[in-house]
Image: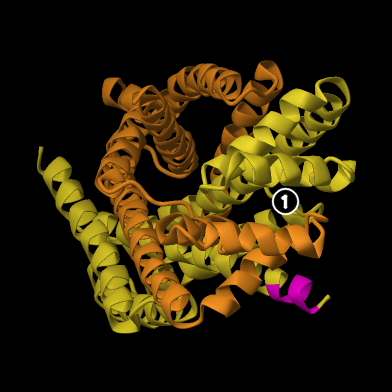
Chain colours: A yellow, B orange
């Protein structure tokens, strides 16, 4: 129960990180790029909101379908393993032995382990699923929750770099404030993200900022170039 | 050697799918959204190219750093496991036994397995890494290759919905051709992606098209709404 809770909260945080990391970066870079090519802040807002809607749907629904596909895949493999332990138990025992042979157990011990495991079909199949196929049982309602969290985090992340443009007339002014606000947010975001995944926090914060700045600079440069043609 | 090859090609395809799926969807939706709000095709091209640059960098570099973080994490955990089998071997043996207890092996057999596995430290540590911690050894050069593939696929995917705008004056005309071309490409892409992952191909193709169309419709509607304010 407690572990379940822990698993859920870490998946939630992972989904927030996935959504927010792209949400802060891509709309920021798009706004920066457009600011190098257009005069008014209005068009930056229009494009930015369109991008946020598109990105949130693509990431959220994309995540939903990926998780559903994973769950379907698990179910069909599970059915096949149950079928195989009924139909070709000796073959399945051989596969158990192969897993243990790889870890240097003697043939005699491999036999013993395979025979004992074969007594409980559920545990036997569970073993095959995890250690032969490398598949973890996906949580039932995870797909929907995950889609919503990723999409919502993308929107929250994307609103941050876009918000300064609501308060200015000229796109160029918006860019100054947007860059300042977003770089601070990327730094804070990168710092906590690294802390939570047990990575060096400052190094992580700097690389998140670096990706955002690079994406924005590339978009800005490219938009200027195209505009000049 | 053959399996290595197989693994590499499936990772390559996975990276192409990740990059192209977002590349086809998000720039398409952004272009559609802007086409609902602006007159000239030029601004759609500028914004589209800025978005493609930003998205390719965010996804590519993001993927690179994620893979690097994963590799660092693996190395530090590996070091810790080697350290622990030296320092607290009885504790580590207990952890091996716990893995097998979960699969219903008798305590006597758990002891035998743990003792035999402890004879070869490399294999013992390998077992702990995989089955206690659930970590697979990441491939050394994967991070760089993966970043490049994802970024390049995003660019290729993004150029497709944008290309019609180069041949028209009015954004609205661009949208008609862009929608036609992109929906065909999303369908073909979804079809082969599902085929390759062993999913029902038509169902997969329809859901990929559905995500793209929904994202484009949302972006279009939102941009119209904002423009009308």
Q: Would you identify the image quadrant in which residue A198 lies? A: bottom left
Q: Which residue is mark 1?
A: A143
Residue B107 appears anywhere in the view: yes
Rendered residue at 68%/38% (across/down): A96
Give A106 or A34, whichever is nearer the viewer: A106
Q: Secondary structure at mark 1?
A: helix
Q: Which residues are magenta?
A: A2-6
Q: Quadrant of the N terminus of chain B?
A: top left
Q: As rendered, which of B83 and B170 lies closer to the eye?
A: B83
Position of residue B104 in the picture relative to residue B136 (left or right): right
Q: Position of residue A213 (x, y in %)?
A: 23, 66
Residue A26, image x, y percentages: 38, 57
Q: Relative to residue A99, is residue A84 depicted above or below? A: above
Question: Residue B33 vs residue B49: left or right?
Answer: right
Residue shown at the point (75%, 74%) measured from the top left? A3
Give the main secondary structure, helix, strand or loop, of the magenta stretch.
helix
Residue drawn at point x = 42 percent, y = 26 percent: B3
Could you say which is closer to the camera, residue A83 or residue B213?
Answer: A83
Seen from this angle, which residue lies furthest front? Answer: A108
Residue drawn where x is 65% and y is 37% of the image: A97
Residue A103: percent from left, percent from top: 52, 48
């Amino acid at each position: 129960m407690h572990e379940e809770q822990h698993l859920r909260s870490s998946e939630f945080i992972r989904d927030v990180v996935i959504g927010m990391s792209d949400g802060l970066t891509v709309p920021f870079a798009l706004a920066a790029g457009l600011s190098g090519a257009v005069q008014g802040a209005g068009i930056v807002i229009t494009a930015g909101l369109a991008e946020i809607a598109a990105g949130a749907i693509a990431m959220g629904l994309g995540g939903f379908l990926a998780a559903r596909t994973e769950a379907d895949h698990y179910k069909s493999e599970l059915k096949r393993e149950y079928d195989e332990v009924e139909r070709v138990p000796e073959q399945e025992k051989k596969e158990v032995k192969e897993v243990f042979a790889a870890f240097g157990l003697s043939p005699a011990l491999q036999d013993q382990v395979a025979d004992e495991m074969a007594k409980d079909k559920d545990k036997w199949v569970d073993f095959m699923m995890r250690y032969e196929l490398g598949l973890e049982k996906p949580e039932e309602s995870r797909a929907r929750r995950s889609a919503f969290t990723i999409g919502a985090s993308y929107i929250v992340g994307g609103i941050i770099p876009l918000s300064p443009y609501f308060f200015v007339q000229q796109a160029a002014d918006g860019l100054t404030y947007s860059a300042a606000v977003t770089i601070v947010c990327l730094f804070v975001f990168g710092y906590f993200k690294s802390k939570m995944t047990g990575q060096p926090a400052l190094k992580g914060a700097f690389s998140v900022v670096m990706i955002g700045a690079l994406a924005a600079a590339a978009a800005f440069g490219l938009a200027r170039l195209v505009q000049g043609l």
